[in-house]
Image: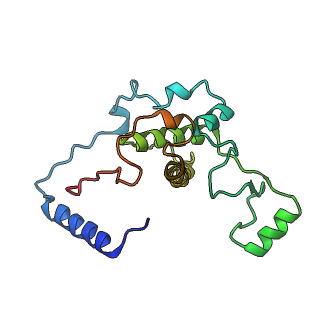
Amino acid sequence: MLANDPRTQWVIEELDQVLHEIEVGPETEIEERPAEDIDISDWESGVEDLQDKSPDAVWDILGFPTKRFPGFNEVEDPTGALDPWDNKKWEAFIKKGQGVPFAPRWHQLVGVVKMMRQLIEGRPLLLMDQVGIGKTLQVVGTLCMYVAFRRHFARYGRFPGHFGKIPLAVAPDEPTADIGLGV
């Protein structure tokens, strides 16, 4: 469901109020520390429980036997030269059978599992790693999975895969993100 005009206006007004209340000025001091001074030795990946899982096992957790994210292309151009948004060229490419199966990398797949858990359990999440590791695919994959999960829930009264066993923090149609808007 897309936000309607009253909801959009409400969010804008709430953001304006929050921004108005923030005190920023020369008196606000921010402690800057060089990155090498930050101890990250005790940080975890957040997916330790999935470390020994194969991609097939991770797809089983999600409950998607097709082993693909809903709405994603089934194949990709191995050269990366073809634009899949160019419909005529893409259709010709598909007919020639030149595509290779598109599959997220293992770390992207387990990231989606983690993000889906956090969404369903109503818990916050910070997705971070090095530049160019695939966070965009993880976020888009999670959004597509969330839509599919909501549809599955509407039809069957539970989420697919292992997620059907997770107690819900909120109903699937309720907001799950409190971003400090006074909600």
| Relative to 70, 48 lies left or right | left
**Quarter-of-image position of residue 38:** top left
* x 33%, y 75%: residue: 5
In which quadrant of the rendered image does the N terminus lie? bottom left
Residue in the foreground of this view, choosing between 32 and 173: 173
| Relative to 170, 109 lies left or right | right
- Name above or below for residue 83 compared with residue 56: below
* x 50%, y 26%: residue: 48
The residue lying furthest to the left in this view is 27
* x 21%, y 65%: residue: 14
Q: Position of residue 104 (x, y in %)?
A: 65, 45
In which quadrant of the rendered image does the C terminus lie? bottom left
**Quarter-of-image position of residue 11:** bottom left
| Relative to 157, 103 lies left or right | right
* x 61%, y 40%: residue: 63
Residue in the foreground of this view, choosing between 116 and 20: 116
| Relative to 94, 17 lies left or right | left
- Name above or below for residue 103 compared with residue 140: above
